[in-house]
Image (cartoon, rainbow, N blue to C red):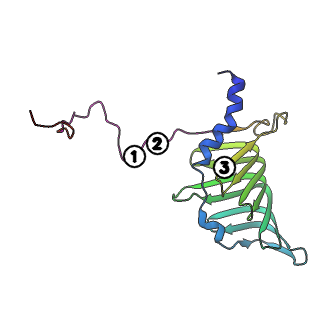
Amino acid sequence: MNRYAVKALLPGLLFLIWSGTACAELADRDKPIHMESDRVFIDDSQQTSEFEGRVQLTQGTLSIVAEKIVVTQDAKGYKHCIATGKLASFRQKREGTDEYMEGYGERIEYDTRAETVDLFGSARVRRDQDDVQGDHIAYNTRTEVFRVVGTPGLAADSPTGGRVRAVLQPKDKDASTPAASANDPLVIQPSTTLSNKP
């Protein structure tokens, strides 16, 4: 397989590797959003709130930390949050495990209606020992799919040089069935498939 075919397959492989294993805590979507900051400016007529200074947004296990977060609410009560900082961060527990996903970006957009988290500018997401970097990372918490995009031609001094970078670690084998060692004694057991009849 030539290198151009590999480049074409890489984004699809990232989707497959991360999509089935990256589901967010499902109960988070039904939890209230809590905000904490040094200052807040609320405009009820425009349904916007601007939080500044060591801002922390939490919704269940999801947490976003930034220097500034602007929250806009639509007519149905859904919220769209734009977090900015050097760097803003998010963290969320994975469904059914004690593991967390964490991400960083110069701007993070969180949409409660679409159930998406988008990271822009020096974007990075880590799960366990896996690490993905790009200029834009889109994470859909409902479909559990990541999309990572680079910006070809970006300045070479940028963290990724405009390319997507990923480190995907091999997964441990099932811990319940330990691998046999060459020094382990051979255990002979009776067959359950052979009959004793002549």
User: Which SS class for mark 2?
Assistant: loop
Identify the residue shown where x is 82% and y is 33%.
156
Q: Quadrant of the C terminus?
A: top left
Q: Position of residue 56 (x, y in %)?
A: 72, 67
Q: Earlier in the sequence, mark 1 or mark 3?
A: 3
Q: Specify the amino acid type for callout 1.
A: Ala
Residue 175 is labelled as 1
Determine the image quadrant of residue 160. Answer: top right
Q: Label 3: which residue?
A: 145
Residue in view at x 66 percent, y 67 percent: 29
Image quadrant of residue 193? top left
Tell me what residue is drawn at x 78 percent, y 35 percent.
161
Eyeballing the image, is 103 above or below 72? above
Q: Nearer the viewer, residue 176 or 181?
A: 176
CB within 8 Å, label 1 to label 2: yes
Quarter holding residue 150: top right
Q: Position of residue 41 (x, y in %)?
A: 86, 74
The answer to whether 76 appears left or right of 24 in the picture is right
User: Type of residue at label 2?
Assistant: Asp
Q: Which residue is mark 2?
A: 172
Question: Residue at image x 76%, y 62%?
Answer: 111
Q: What secondary structure characterizes most of the magenta part?
A: loop
